[in-house]
Amino acid sequence: MQEPKSQETPCEEQAENVPSTESKKQFSRRGFLKAAATSAAVAGGTGLIGSLPLAAESKASVAGSEPEGARPIPPVHAPAKWDDEADVVVVGTGGGGLAAALKAAENGKKVIVIEKLSEESVGGTTKQAIVFITYGGSRLQNEAKFAVPGFPFNATKAVQEMYPYFQYSADISMLEAVYGAMGPCVDWMEQLGVPWELDPYTGPMCHVWKGIDKEGFIARGIKPVTDLMYRVAKEKGVKFYLETAAVALVSEGGRIVGLKTRSLTTGKTRYLKGATGVVLAAGGFANNRDMLKKYLPAVYEGAGCTYAMPCDTGECIRMGVGAGADIAGLGSSTSFDAGIDWFSDGKGTFHQYLYNGSTQLARQPWLGIDINGNRYPYLDVYPAKQHNPWDLMPNQAAVHMSLPGHRGYVIFDKHYEENIAKFKQWGCRRPIQPNWPDIDRMPEWTAAHDWREGAKYAIEKGAIKRSNTLEGLGEMLGFKPGVIGKSVASWNEVCASGEDKQFYFPKDWLVPVLEPPFHGIRIGGNVFATKCGLRVTPKMQVVDTNQKVIPGLYAAFHTAGGNVGESALSSEPNCVGMTFTSGFIAGQAVCEEKA
């Protein structure tokens, strides 16, 4: 582990952890609500994200050196006096952080949790998710006699089933530990008060809050889970410091013993002692362009946007690396399909909410072509229960990111509002409607309740191109002359024939492009989670580059990495299950460590 900096040495690289006065003004409540119209708002009632401007790319301070947003953050020495003390300090209030804090508190430990956003945002990116995927072993799954690859559940067999999807490059022992603990984690959460049921729409692999999935609308289905866990954690005496950024790990005698923090409202520095350990559970780095370029270059080039919330900026991973930690999962991520290129087109931020109307419009099976005018495949998701959750949407993102120029293009005409219903897409590809049951579960700062509003806004802002001629549209999208016209003519012939012999679209999907104005969207992947992070043991202990445990340091996914192996352009989307379960494991393991 690297030697900590002197306590008196200014930690200059931490300047990005505290927003300037100007940036606070920029993300005021009014600005926040305005930004929500483009689905680019911060998740919660505050813009205090404690990082560089969203998805900004910083310049190297010295020619040839590493950009500041990706530089490791070394630990600091322990202070002469701690501002607050606990047995365990947890960073982050997503599923992993809440599970770790609650598990430690149940073991009689004094726990402090810090969160850089406001109370409204407790739950992090996890509460934006829909289901808790487990491969078997929960009470409900045992009663249904369900398990992957077959009942009764066996974690070793489940890993063997999944291993080919991970290029045989993930840590088997770590995966077996997490897969084996998923069922017990679900049951433990049930004991806390979560009324789980197996989702009637997505099937017995998925646990949801009972009754929340109405007619297939499960946006933010995990929110009541994280809300309950936060409430129970406070009841059990867990102390929360909100709107507080992690600045650096604190090291003493080769051991991590606490955390240096800074209040994002007052600027006050606090040293928080974690006598037995610190659990890093602050998510990944999907909104840190410097880290994407360093650790996930194919995603850096291939992603049009990210669904991960704007607080996903990777400081805790940099802190772990600064303490000597090894990295696992280089090149690996999970993405959804059809990430609209707001950011590189200069039309908006890199963060775009998944249920935004423009995103849902882009995710439909329109005519999809690459920059040379060639069609590419479209992977259907309906009915979802017929497919494995690690297929389809993540693979569709891989299709987009691997095309020439790392982008795809969807083309359609003026009748998109009526034609979209023909595709009958399911889940998060299903265009959102204001009359859906429980629509208010998804507040309008995330996305308008009518998909048409988001689509029209994107057209007005130029993220969706519109022209009265195909050649004009092609020029706006960057096609060579004649390419888009030839592709559309060929597609219209397929539609007129009633048979798609290339990709076998059903007849309902054969929607011609005939009447102006014509529309086109430039799309890449839509990053759901970075899968590159700190390498951990089966107990979620962080290890250094010599594969030795760094005493006192733990990480939950997706601050931890490697759960889908190396170089996975887009892999299985079991992020909620990995997050909650890894925190559950870390919360127990840190209690077993001796200070």
Image (cartoon, rainbow, N blue to C red):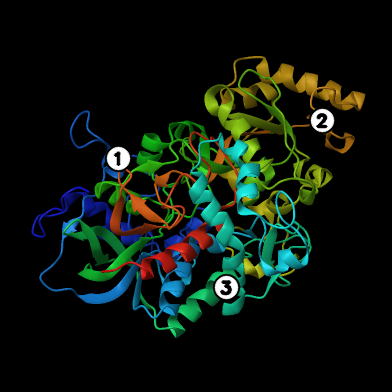
Toward which corner of the image does residue 24 lie, by quadrant?
A: bottom left
User: In this rendering, which labeled residue sits more in front, label 1 or label 3?
Assistant: 3
Residue 340 rendering spot, x and y as whole percentages? 57, 40
Q: In this image, 583 relative to 127: left or right? A: left
Is residue 446 shown to the viewer in this render? no
Look at label 2 and name its amino acid: Pro
Residue 271: give x, y in percent of width and height.
21, 69
Foreground label between 2 and 1: 1
Circle 1 Cα neighbour tier, 10 Å, few/some/many (<14 / 14–19 / ≥20)? some
Q: Secondary structure at mark 3?
A: helix
Which of the marked residues, 1 or 3, is nearer the chain's N terminus? 1
> Alpha-carbon distance for marks 2 and 1?
44 Å
Q: Amino acid at mark 1?
A: Ser
Q: Residue at x 51, y 32 (%)?
A: 302
Are dots 3 and 2 in contact, CB under 8 Å?
no
Q: Give the label on residue 12, or none.
A: none
Disc number placed over residue 188 in the picture, else none = 3
Element carrying mark 2 = loop
- Residue at 26% from the left image edge and 70% from the top image edge: 275
Element under disc 1: loop
Is residue 206 rendered to the left or right of residue 81?
right
Q: Which residue sits at x=43%, y=81%?
A: 234
Q: Position of residue 335 (x, y in %)?
A: 57, 43
Q: Which residue is mark 1?
A: 58
Q: Amino acid at mark 3?
A: Trp
Q: Nearer the viewer, mark 3 or mark 2?
A: 3
* CA distance for labels 3 and 2: 52 Å
Give the residue pinned by disc 2. Answer: 512
Q: Is residue 488 above or below residue 26?
A: above
Q: Is residue 240 visible?
A: yes
